[in-house]
Image: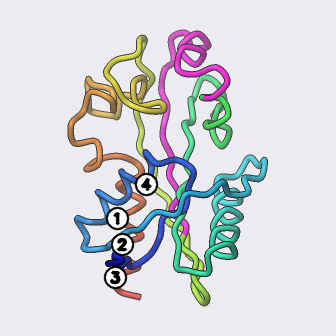
Amino acid sequence: MQKSFDLFFVSSNNHKYVEAKSILETFGIKLGFLKSELEEIQSNSLDEIAMRKAKDAFSKFKKPVIIEDDGLFINSLSGFPGPYSSYVFKTIGNDGILNLLKNNRKAKFVSIITYCDKTNFQSFTAKLDGMISKFQKGKGWGYDPIFIPKNSQKTFAEINEKNKLSHRYKALKKFSNWYLHK
């Protein structure tokens, strides 16, 4: 028997889907997954990237969809890698980021959830301040082993309840409030 979903998360990143599904379940939203490579334009704007990806996802699947785009913005690197976070992670990884940093380790994660259906198009942005650790700590995916959220001593990879405080959680919470009342 086929499962019934309220909407679908479209991404090539299964880790993002698993986090989003877990978070949205706490709000009573059933999230399905459509694995797909989406058009990702080169832009300095996460908003523009997310908007294009959401439109691409809806045009491919003709179902209510959300996409998530995010970036790690490091103060001492003038916001780098920002919207290029995925590419930078694939090319130089966490070790490369750690090698670029000296003393100023302040950073923030920004997440944008963009929803698209036949008649609605909405984006929800959230950020989480923190810093970059001096060494990788814990087992996690992406930048989780090097990002320490504000008011914590542990990296995302070391925190059991990451999904209750992350940038993705905050953006999905904003989305849920809108979605459940639209």
Mark 2 and mark 1 in contact? Answer it, CB < 8 Å. Answer: yes
Side (left or right) of 37 relative to 30: right
Helix, strand, or loop for circle 3?
A: loop
* Residue identified by numbered label 2: 176
Q: Amino acid at mark 1?
A: Lys
Q: The N terminus is located in which quarter? A: bottom left
Horizontal and vertical percent for residue 173? Answer: 34, 64
Q: Is 121 or 4 nearer to us in this picture?
A: 4
* Residue identified by numbered label 1: 173
Helix, strand, or loop for circle 4?
A: helix
Q: Amino acid at mark 2?
A: Ser
Mark 2 and mark 3 in contact? Answer it, CB < 8 Å. Answer: yes
Question: Which of disc 4 and disc 3 is earlier in sequence?
Answer: 4
Question: Which of disc 4 and disc 2 is earlier in sequence?
Answer: 4
* Residue identified by numbered label 4: 17
Report the label total: 4
Label at residue 163? none
Question: Which of disc 3 and disc 1 is earlier in sequence?
Answer: 1
Q: Amino acid at mark 4?
A: Tyr
Horizontal and vertical percent for residue 125? Answer: 50, 59
- Per the model, the C-alpha gap separating discs 1 and 3 is 11 Å
Q: Determine the image quadrant of residue 87.
A: top right
